[in-house]
Image (cartoon, rainbow, N blue to C red):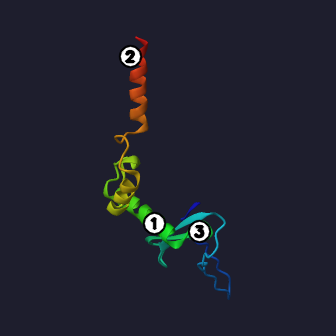
Amino acid sequence: MLVFQNQEHPKLELAGLTVRVEDIDHTATQFDLTLVVSERVDRDGAARGLTATLTYAQDLFDEDTVRGFADRFTRLLEAVVADPDSPVGDLDILDADERGNLLDRTGGPAHPATTLPQLLTTAAAHNRTARR
């Protein structure tokens, strides 16, 4: 679940009553994995960045696994900011160690890297040639 909280906090003003919004400590989640991203604003309403909180089902995930998800998501966001025109599919979410471990476990790439559009173009060209 991805939640983006970007709503203004309501202002309630009544004579003799002071109301303020309090952050709630999210220690439970309704979903297996939830990322809540919230805008931070100062007293004047000026944007002061974002905060993110991950909650997860502890019977499915451990802290190291979720930390890995967070690290990869952060890496993806940094790559998007560094090159906003780059297609998402071209962005690498693995760091060098993760990529090395993956290649070691799988014996390296079994075939050259390709994309679905490239596969479809190749198949269409092959079928067109085969029908002639």
Q: Which mark is residue 129?
A: 2
Q: Earlier in the sequence, mark 3 or mark 2?
A: 3
Q: Nearer the viewer, residue 5 or 33?
A: 33
Q: Mark 1 — residue?
A: 68
Q: Amino acid at mark 3?
A: Tyr
Residue 86: % across, % down: 34, 48
Q: Mark 3 — residue?
A: 56
Q: Amino acid at mark 2?
A: Thr
Residue 45: % across, % down: 48, 73
Q: Nearer the viewer, residue 129 or 52?
A: 129
Contact flag, marks 3 and 2 (Cβ < 8 Å): no
Q: Amino acid at mark 1?
A: Gly
Q: CA distance from mark 3 to mark 2?
A: 52 Å
Q: CA distance from mark 1 to mark 3?
A: 13 Å
Residue 104: % across, % down: 36, 56
Contact flag, marks 2 and 1 (Cβ < 8 Å): no
Q: CA distance from mark 2 to mark 1?
A: 46 Å
Q: Quadrant of the N terminus?
A: bottom right
Identity of the residue drawn at 34% across and 58% down: 100
Q: Which mark is residue 9?
A: none
Task: Check disc 1: other Cα within 10 Å, few if <14, some if 14-19, many if 20+.
Answer: few
Q: Quadrant of the C terminus?
A: top left
